[in-house]
Amino acid sequence: MYVLRRPRAWYNKIKSYFAQENFMKCAHEHILFLKNNSEGKMLILSLYVDNLIYIGDDIAITDMGRMRYFLGVEVKQNDEGIFISQSKYIY
């Protein structure tokens, strides 16, 4: 039973930290957190287990280019949209 409670305890701890830092939890997606500062800049965080990805419109954030992989999912972006796949797992 203890093992089953640990992930929830960790999630509650990080959720409370985000709340303390004035992030708003998305009402429709429990892994998505949003923050707007007084200058109108936005930061969006997505949390999955112990993986975190964030995007924002502040120049203080380093642009590392387009995302290619996240959680084993390949991400392709072009003018037609954003496409995800797991083709590397196909034999």
Image (cartoon, rainbow, N blue to C red):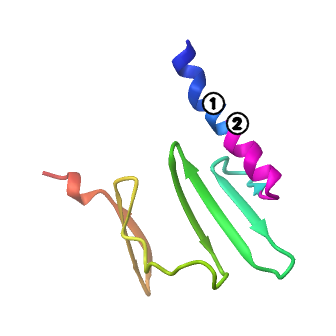
The verdict on residue 15 being magenta is yes
Q: Position of residue 47 (x, y in %)?
A: 58, 51
Tag 1: amino acid: Arg
What's drawn in magenta, residue-wise? 12-23
- Decide if residue 78 is on the left or right side of residue 38: left
Tag 2: amino acid: Asn
Frontmost residue, 79 versus 88: 88
Tell me what residue is drawn at x 44 percent, y 87 percent.
79
Q: Position of residue 81 (x, y in %)?
A: 46, 78
Q: CA distance from mark 2 to mark 1?
A: 6 Å
Frontmost residue, 90 versus 66: 66
Q: Which mark is residue 80?
A: none
**Residues marked 2 and 1 touching at CB (< 8 Å):** yes
Tell me what residue is drawn at x 76 percent, y 43 percent.
16
- Per the picture, the main secondary structure of the magenta-coloured stretch is helix
Residue placed under numbered mark 1 in the picture? 8
- Decide if residue 89 is on the left or right side of residue 9: left
Q: Quadrant of residue 5?
A: top right
Reply above or below: 12 against 1: below
Residue placed under numbered mark 2 in the picture? 12
Q: Position of residue 10 (x, y in %)?
A: 62, 35
Reply above or below: 25 against 82: above
